[in-house]
Each structure stands twice: as structure tokens, then as C-alpha cells.
Image (cartoon, rainbow, N blue to C red):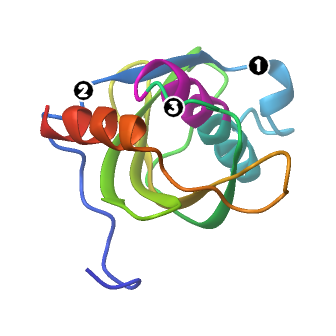
Amino acid sequence: MTDRDPVPDLGPADVAAVRLPLRFRDLDAFGHVYHAEYLTLLDEARTAWFRDGLRLDDAGDYVLARVEVDYVSSLVRTDRWVSASFGVERVGGTSLTLREELRADDGRVVARGRSVCVLRDLASGGSRPVTEAERARIEAYAAG
């Protein structure tokens, strides 16, 4: 898969979703969720998924090295919730490449994306390796 390939749909093994409410501040003057808020929603959901789904040792200690988003459909004021689903595409030495999908509460896909998340060591400020225990949990999750 190259950087220019479209982001694939998440498969049936990628069933764990994080559900987030849409907030008034997410909306623009026309009642649509502002495009940059999609990134905020994905970030909030990704951190929760790292904590609850993958059970990473330090779930919030990562930085985005790359993110891409394909906007598929608008989120609007009447969409009260959005669900984010994640699939593991690759596990590196210090990073994870994820497929990401946002769905409105009626089930329609509103965005698909891919992110590269680098795990951070708070003490040094640099990257940290994926631990063996984390790798085992990630691989078990990916296997479904």
C-alpha cells in the first residue's frame, strides 16, 4: 500500500468503536461539524481506544507523525453522536499505523483515514519502543 492508495474500509475484525457526543463547539455557522473537528474527534477516540482497546501502557503518550483524512459525508447538528473505529495496519518498533473511520449515529461513514502514531517517552521527550506486552496485545487485537 502506498501513501496515495485510498484508505480501505475497516473490516469485520475492526469492530471495537469509541462513541463520542457531538458538541455545540464542533459546529460551524451552517450547522456542520467543522472539518478540523474531525481530527479532534479522532484524537479523543484514538486515545480512548489506545487505553481501553489496546491497553497501551501509556495510552496518551503518543504524537502523530502523519495523518490523512478522506471526508465522505457531512456531520450536522442533528447527528448527536459519532463513532470512531480503528484497525491496526502496521506495528513498527516505536509506532503504529492505523486505519480510522468515523460514522454518524445513523451508521453512515463520514470520514476514513490513516494515522501513524509514534509512542513517546515522557522523561526523555523522544520516542519509545512498543513493549513486548503491548505488541502481544496489539497482535491479539488485530487477529480479532
Q: Position of residue 51 (x, y in %)?
A: 54, 23
Across and down, in percent, residue 104 comes to 45, 27
**81 to 85, vertically: above or below:** above
Q: Return the residue at label 2.
A: 15
Q: CA distance from mark 2 to mark 1?
A: 24 Å
Please report the residue visible at 67 percent of the width from the left and 23 percent of the height from the top.
77
Residue 71 x %, y %: 51, 57
Please name whichever residue, 101 or 124, is drawn nearer the observer in this view of the structure. 124
Could you say whether the residue bearing mark 3 is in a helix, strand or loop? loop
Is 144 situated above or below 71?
above
Which residue is drawn at the image coordinates 32% and 72% (left, top)?
A: 6
Magenta stretch bounds: 44-54
Residue with the mark numbered 3: 56
Q: Nearer the viewer, residue 125 or 111?
A: 125
Question: What type is the residue that disc 2 sits on?
Answer: Val
Residue 124, compared with residue 26, is above or below; it is below
Question: N-terminal of the two: label 2 or label 1?
Answer: 2
Q: CA distance from mark 3 to mark 2?
A: 18 Å
Residue 136 painted magenta = no
Percent coordinates x, y for residue 89 in the rendering: 30, 58
Q: Nearer the viewer, residue 111 or 119?
A: 119
Q: Give the amino acid at mark 3.
A: Leu
Secondary structure of the residue carrying tag 1 is loop
Query: Is residue 128 left or right of 72 when viewed as pictured?
Result: right
Location of residue 30 by image quarter: top right
Q: Name the residue nearer the viewer: 143 or 121.
A: 121
Q: Secondary structure at mark 2?
A: loop
User: Could you tell me how many numbered marks the image carries?
Assistant: 3
Name which of mark 3 and mark 1 comes first in the sequence: 1
For marks 3 and 1, give the CA distance. Answer: 28 Å
The residue identified by callout 1 is 23
